[in-house]
Each structure stands twice: as structure tokens, then as C-alpha cells.
Image (spheres, rainbow, N blue to C red):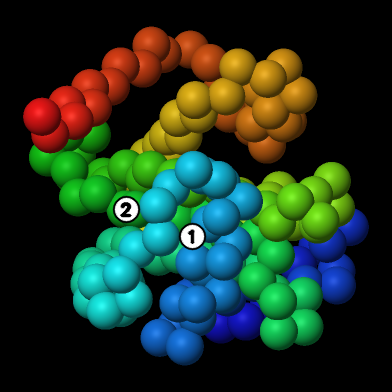
Amino acid sequence: MAEPAGDGAADIVIRPAATGDLLALLALYRHLNHDDPDMDLGFAEDRFAAILAHPGMTIFVAFEGNLAVSSITLVVIPNLTRRGASYALIENVVTHADHRQRGHARALIKTAIATAWEKNCYKVMLLTGSKEPATLRFYAKCGFTQDKTGFQIRRPAAG
């Protein structure tokens, strides 16, 4: 299911992540969370295998040649409300710093949303920690609205 992207991102191919993509994804994620410590490769391989096997979870990757330039994670969650319609969550939206402003993330978001609709989700949610007006405008231009209040709680650091 590799497809050329649209929206000015025609130089990329978007496809679901596969087993051989781990190192490319780990390098790309450095552009999302610069201060994350390196993960043990064996643990990363186990975690990636679990992600690939997890029902309803897809990491979409945009490749320019052999380089992973952008990625997004889509999770489709079964539901008992809304007549059983699932809902979806988008997480870990990242574009390589040297490849931003080219439409890659927008193409990935469109792919993730289309996939959610194909799976009969009734909504797609996305949270961002960014306060940057440009980032918030970007998500609004992708069709998201800020009409709900999000909350989170993070696990306390081990002490």
C-alpha cells in the first residue's frame, strides 16, 4: 500500500511502517523529541515488533527515496458508544528538520484521516503540546477544531 503523496509532496511515498524501518524511524524521532535518551536497540526492536502486531495501530511513514522524512501514528480504538463506531487517535507527528514546509505532514495526516474513515471511525483526535501559533494553524488547516478540552497526567519520575 505505498502511494505517492499529493498536496505538493509528490516526491514522497507514504506507506505503513514495516519491520526493516526501525532504524529510520528512530533517527526521524530525534526530530520530535531531541532530549529523549537513546533506547537500547534490543528493547526498541521488541517494542517495534509489538507496535507492528498491535491491532488498529499503524505508523505511516513518508519516504523521499530511502530517507524517512515524516511519520505519524494512527491508533483506531474499538468503542461501545456511537453505535459501536470506533474512534481514532493521531500521535507522534514528526517531520525531519531539513524537510519541513513541503507538505509531508499534511499528506500523512490526510492519509491517517482517510484510513480512519475507511475503518468507520466517527472521529479522529489529535493532541499537541505545542503552543506555537503556526503549529496550531497547521492542524486547523488540516481540518481539526479546538472544540474540546484535553487533559493528561504523566507518570511521576522514579525517585
Identity, as a three-letter code, of the amino acid under mark 1? Thr
Q: Is residue 39 visible?
A: yes
- Residue 56's spot in the image, x, y percent? 29, 62
Label 2 – label 1 distance at C-alpha: 9 Å
- Residue 68's spot in the image, x, y percent? 65, 71
Q: Quadrant of residue 118?
A: bottom left
Frontmost residue, 89 versus 84: 89
- Residue 150's spot in the image, x, y percent? 36, 17
Q: Give me the residue at 59% from left, 62% from top.
A: 28
Report the side of 87 relative to 93 (left or right): left
Mark 1 sits on what residue?
115
- 137 lies above or below 90: above
Identity, as a three-letter code, of the amino acid under mark 2? Val
Name the quarter where the C terminus is drawn.
top left
Report the side of 131 relative to 124 (left or right): right
Q: Give me the residue at 49% from left, 25% from top.
A: 129
Frontmost residue, 70 versus 9: 70
Neighbourhood count class around disc 1 (C-alpha, 10 Å): few under 14, some 14–19, many 20 upward? some
Mark 2 sits on what residue?
76
